Amino acid sequence: MSRILVIDDDNAINELIKVNLELEGYSVIQAYDGITGFALCKQELPSVVVLDVMMPEVDGFTVAQRIRKNESTKDIPILMLTALSQINDKVTGFDIGVDDYLVKPFEMEELKVRVRALLKRSNQIPQSAYTKDILTLGEVTILPETYSVKINDKIVKLTPIEFDIFNLLFQNHGNMVPSSRLLKDVWGYSPDDDIETIRVHIRHLRAKLDKISNGKKYISTIYGGGYKFEV
């Protein structure tokens, strides 16, 4: 049974999330402040953390940073909840390593869909590990079992989301992949046109590839359309 850790200082919202996730068959752990939440995260090692931003003493951004820096918790998916809708807040969360973002007020069905998508991504080896997807193009090879990319003799490890983005572009090499398809295929649902979400993850992905590509650029932006991978 998947365990979900909910960290939110609003008792009513915390309890509402707990009830709805338990109805889906999940085991739910609750924390009402950031300090307790991080301690429970290290102790329980949940499948997903649902984390509110605005909390007293230790806010959600700080908790997310601590989760990502701790060796035992660094790979746990984080769904961040916030009443803030500004782009800068999303960028801050994604830069820290948050996997997904949900703005309050939200529908519980939307929360459940996003939790399911995070669980699916974290619990499964990518499709390319056991299908006939392309694994090598020129000097570039994808290594699905370890979420890594190899360029010539150098290897860089990606996060599951970064790998899913790269693999989608890789399998469609030479063709533009629309932003709407990236949002749907990578995040596992059809969200609003949250283009900034893609931009932040593409930026992180490019930075990692730059470390092993000897200056060669593989992912191009098609302005107003999407992205394209070319060898």
Image (tube, rainbow, N blue to C red):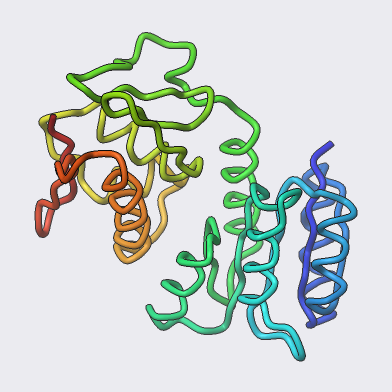
Task: Tell me which residue sits at (13%, 47%) in the image.
Answer: 220
Q: In the rendered image, which quarter is residue 201 located in?
A: bottom left
Going by the image, does 120 lie left or right of 161?
Answer: right
The number of numbered discs placed on residues in the rendered structure image is 0
Give whichever of 30, 36 is nearer the camera.
Answer: 36
Q: Quadrant of the C terminus?
A: top left
Q: Is residue 4 above or below residue 230?
A: below
Q: Is residue 64 above or below residue 171?
A: below
Which residue occupies the extreme bottom position in the image? 56
Q: Position of residue 35 (x, y in %)?
A: 83, 76
Going by the image, does 160 lie left or right of 198?
Answer: right
Task: Tell me which residue sits at (47%, 74%) in the image.
Answer: 92
Q: Quadrant of the N terminus?
A: top right
Q: Is residue 140 above or below residue 200?
A: above
Q: Position of residue 111 (x, y in %)?
A: 62, 58
Task: Tell me which residue sits at (37%, 62%) in the image.
Answer: 197
Task: Tell me which residue sits at (90%, 54%) in the image.
Answer: 43
Q: Position of residue 224 (x, y in %)?
A: 11, 59
